[in-house]
Image: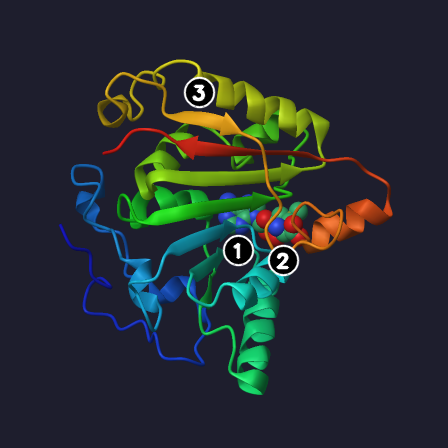
Amino acid sequence: MSFGLGHGKTLDPAPGVVGISPDELPPLPDSILDDPDSGRVDPRLWFTDPARPFQIEIGSGKGAFLVQQGALEPDTNFLGIEWAKEFYAYSADRVRRRRASDGSLANIRLLCADAGEFLRWRCPPGIVAVIHLYFSDPWPKSRHHKKRVVQDRFLGDAYRALLPGGEIRIVTDHDELWAWDTAHFDRWTKAPPPDGAVGELTGGSAAYELRSFDAPESAGESELVGSNFERKFRREGRSFHAGVLRRLGGA
Ligand SMILES: C[S@@+](CC[C@H](N)C(=O)[O-])C[C@H]1O[C@@H](n2cnc3c(N)ncnc32)[C@H](O)[C@@H]1O
């Protein structure tokens, strides 16, 4: 199955165009519940070389990780997904300025959207090498827990979007959020996925294995990832949790 840009709309993948705003995506068709593939678009086509490995950062904030790692890995395409318009605009402008000054960062684009919704309804299966999730909002009140990125539904949607062997890389400073994350990881690493999830894809086995986190090349000495929030929290003396969920199964 191939997935186009959707509804004949042109998302301009030309160098110099960084941001993709919500109104550039076609509306989800009414048939979406019967045909979950009917709203998909292929984000790899938003890059000048769509054949390169494709990674996503969820909640890219001011874009420090994308800018640092994207510069060191020009042969990988990075899509930052940030739903807060001011951070989306800030980081797109940061990438645009850097591109204009030295021609680098043609491999970075920013999408203003809910990353969970993007993975569920838009992203084609089996295309993402890495999903980065750094210092995700902890939403500490229990009535807001549903807003946390890590949910069973998210782990199922990420499983579908990831390539075999693909990874979800997570760092947080928040003890209670990490307890929530690891409780979810247990359900996906120690047994077949929960009912109604992607059991048909895992063939009755666990969906992921949990591995230790290695810092990316762009992280500074003694940093885990070197994002804006990590640097702020380090100055405050906080400690961190980190892990990698590696997608099991070949299909
Ligand atoms: C605490 S900040 C961390 C920013 C950056 N990752 C860092 O480490 O500096 C969390 C970011 O995730 C964004 N965010 C939270 N949930 C999101 C979602 N479902 N989709 C897209 N962005 C999201 C927030 O707007 C915020 O900018």
Q: What residue type is labelled 3?
A: Thr
Residue farthest bottom in this picture: 101
Per the image, label 2 sits on a secondary structure element best described as loop
> Left or right: where does residue 202 sit relative to residue 234?
left
Q: Which mark is residue 189?
A: 3
Label 1 lies in ligand 1 vicinity (Cβ under 8 Å): yes
User: Disc 1 or 3, which lies upstream in sequence?
Assistant: 1
218 is higher (above) or lower (below) than 225: below
Q: Residue 82 carries which label?
A: 1
Q: Are marks 1 and 3 in contact (CB under 8 Å)?
A: no
The amino acid pointed to by label 2 is: Ser
Q: Residue furthest right?
A: 236
Answer with mark 1 or mark 2, whichever residue precedes in sequence: 1
**Residue 62 visible in rendering:** no
Circle number at residue 218: 2
Give the percent coordinates (x, y) of residue 34: 16, 37
In the foreground, 103 or 73: 73
Point out residue 165 in the picture as x, y percentages from the top left corner.
36, 37
Q: Quadrant of residue 156?
A: top left
Residue depicted at 33% across the width and 59% down the height:
43
Instruction: Check whether the beta carbons of the residues at disc 2 and disc 3 lie within 8 A of each other.
Output: no
* Gap in angstroms between the C-alphas marked 2 and 3: 29 Å
Mark 2 Cβ inside 8 Å of ligand 1:
no
